[in-house]
Image (cartoon, rainbow, N blue to C red):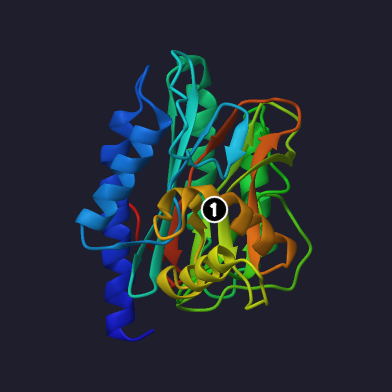
Amino acid sequence: MDNTTYNNYIKAGAIAARVLSDARKKVVSGATYLNIIQQTEQMITDAGAQLACPSTISVNDIAAHYTPLLNDTSTIGDNDVVKLDIGVMIDGCIADTATTICLDSNYNDMNNTAKSALEKALKLAIPGTNVGNIGGVIESEIISKGYNPIVNLSGHVLSSYELHSGFSIPNIKTNTKDTLSEDMVLAIEPFVTDGRGLIKEINKVQIFRYIAQRPTRLPAARKLLDLAKTKYHSMPFTSRWISDVSPLMLDSALRQLSDSKAIYLYPVLKETGSGIVAQAEHTVIVRDKPIVTTKI
């Protein structure tokens, strides 16, 4: 990793840490999801960074991928458990980080378990570590506290303009030959639940990503596909960001691009047993002494 790339990862991480620290203060009873997320994304761009993905706000048994649309009037409840997950990018170098805010103190222990599992996993981000062992440490910590890891959610490798690159970083012990090498950049993100420990897709999709150029009859779909490829650098985006396509045509364009497999869909993910979910996430550069870029 050259000095410019390293410095960009460090800068992206510092911005992400600062924004997430400020954004979590906005999660109060009665606040709208939309206002929280729009302010969070504005803080990222005001800091001179790009959005690596739509910021998400996943509440209670919703584990991931919920980003409010412009007509979303959902508000934070008095006892909600709220996951904020953000992605920050500087010239393709990404910082991915998340935190959980428990308005119900009964879930503080679950939240602390996610944090402690993450801290133990980060110490293993050294060259030569088998990623199955990272998952084993996360799983062991979570189980020891009486909770379940979500087995079908995982962390991931980050690379230039790629949020999910290479292999996954599991949250359970797995048998794999995948090992870490120096200067890999990882997002490690334990998910903890008092439910079954599984997530399922629900029929709500608010985040998309360019896959490939496909022929399409609808002019709005062609325009949207070009935006997905060029403006968003093939990174995840949300229809909330699209002002270049008529709102009347946007849903039709997304549907046509989805049907032709021109774009990838990120459905909202829900815990199958309706368990509450807590999440903690940091980005780390693999070194003999791991460098966590998203810590304040």
Q: Is residue 296 visible?
A: no
Q: Residue at x 50, y 40 (%)?
A: 116
Q: Relative to 111, is 240 above or below?
A: below
Specify the farthest residue to the bottom. 2
The amino acid sitting under disc 1 is Leu
Q: Quadrant of residue 146?
A: top right
The residue tagged 1 is: 250
**Callout 1: helix, strand or loop?**
helix
Number of disc labels: 1
Q: Residue at x 69, y 72 (%)?
A: 178
Q: Quadrant of residue 200?
A: top right
Q: Quadrant of the N terminus?
A: bottom left
Judge from the rendering whether residue 217 lies leftward or rightward of residue 100; answer left or right: right
Q: Is residue 42 visible?
A: yes
Q: Position of residue 187 (x, y in %)?
A: 50, 59
Q: Residue at x 43, y 47 (%)?
A: 55
Judge from the rendering whether residue 8 lies leftward or rightward of residue 160; answer left or right: left
Q: Position of residue 65 (x, y in %)?
A: 56, 45
